[in-house]
Image (cartoon, rainbow, N blue to C red):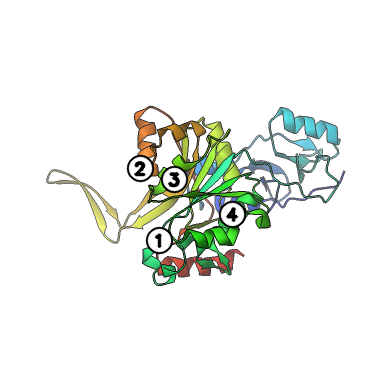
Amino acid sequence: MVSLENPSLPPEATLRDAVGAIEATPRRLAVVADADGMLLGTVTDGDIRRGLLRGLTLEDGVASVMNKTPTTAHIDSDRTYLLELLVNRRLESLPLVDSQGHYRAVISRYDLGSLPEGTAEKQRSGIALAVIMAGGEGQRLRPMTETLPKPMVDIGGMPLIERIVRTLVDAGVPRICIAVNYLRHVIQQHFGDGAALGGSIDYLLEETKLGTAGALSLLPEVPDGPILVMNGDVLTRFDCNALQRFHAEHGAAITVAAMEYRVDIPYGVIQSSGAQVTGLSEKPSQRFLCSAGIYMLDPSLLAEIPPDTRFDMTDLIARCLAGGQPVCLFPLHEYWADIGTPDDLAKARRALLKLE
């Protein structure tokens, strides 16, 4: 069997290092080994996100999230055994070791499939439909947006929304709807039916502004699976299929993707009780998780969205919480930027040069 190399991380590596290792390979697994090559553990994307939910940061060590007893197989195992092991343990990938426990390679279901060697298999998504909200005017970006919808603003030689569409098509999302209002003909003429990009695109025509969720009432039918909803003015490299898997794993009615926002307070902060000082923190930093404008919805929630009415995602989330329906949080560790102002746009363009 061909050895499938996947470089290992040292035990002192950080979660940020693990993110880079996972994103660098289609096998989506980071392996940790010591200086002698002995396997110490593995890290998945889910391990990292669960760590972030516990309050860890990307600068914490991989040992804080690492699976120290991962399923492994011998490097000389045959394909049938490996495939059965992956399927029975519900794993996408696993490390291969030699008789002494030294890490040698990573094998995945992709590697053991029936396609000819070297043939790329298009990823199958569990997302039934993606809806991109692209009806905003982008007033803070004027005069640029006087003749151009904000999602069509150029980022690195390509409209921002085209980057979103291409990412969704590459992820195997079968259908995309774009909710349009302001200068909608520009977006419609650019994409058409989406065939040129290998996808399928329809349009939800907002005659009045319906908010960040109201346009979902314009869907002609209820899809038979989860719905990805995202704003058309965000630049991100998030994994929409990881969000869908997380959503399904937690049985959520709605899952909110969240990015970390830190506020550094330049003063000593006093804790007190009445006139008594109980503590003092010197220039503390506060951490907040904020909505990234990306959501995964159970299709049953479409019944909660009123027609012809402005209705935001915050309204839908409030209804879910009031009704006792589970709302979950999906922490983003990928790059994310909201393009709201000329300064945001300039920063995103500079960041893209480093990412590509």
What amino acid is at disc 2?
A: Thr
Q: Residue furthest bottom?
A: 143
Out of 150 and 321, give the one closest to the viewer. 150
- As measured in the structure, the alpha-carbon distance from the residue carrying label 4 to the one carrying label 1 is 20 Å
Residue 137 badge? 1
Q: Residue at x 56, y 33 (%)?
A: 248
Report the mark closest to the observer, 4 or 1.
1
Task: Classify residue 92 as left or right of residue 302.
Answer: right
Residue 309 badge? 2
Mark 4 or mark 1, which has the lower sequence index?
1
- As measured in the structure, the alpha-carbon distance from the residue carrying label 2 to the one carrying label 1 is 19 Å
Residue 304, position in %: x, y? 41, 33
What amino acid is at disc 3?
A: Ala
Task: Classify residue 198 as left or right of residue 258.
Answer: right
Q: Local crowd at mark 1 within 10 Å, few (<14), some, or many (≥20)? A: some
What amino acid is at disc 4?
A: Val
What amino acid is at disc 1?
A: Glu
Task: Classify residue 194 as left or right of residue 102.
Answer: left
Residue 107, position in %: x, y? 76, 42
**Mark 4: secondary structure:** helix
- As measured in the structure, the alpha-carbon distance from the residue carrying label 3 to the one carrying label 4 is 18 Å
Q: Quadrant of residue 266?
A: bottom left
Residue 215 badge? 3
Residue 165 badge? 4
Mark 3 or mark 4, which has the lower sequence index?
4
- As measured in the structure, the alpha-carbon distance from the residue carrying label 4 to the one carrying label 2 is 27 Å
**Mark 3: secondary structure:** helix
Report the mark closest to the observer, 2 or 1.
2
- As measured in the structure, the alpha-carbon distance from the residue carrying label 3 to the one carrying label 1 is 16 Å
**Mark 1: secondary structure:** loop
Task: Classify residue 322 as left or right of residue 329.
Answer: left
Mark 2 or mark 1, which has the lower sequence index?
1
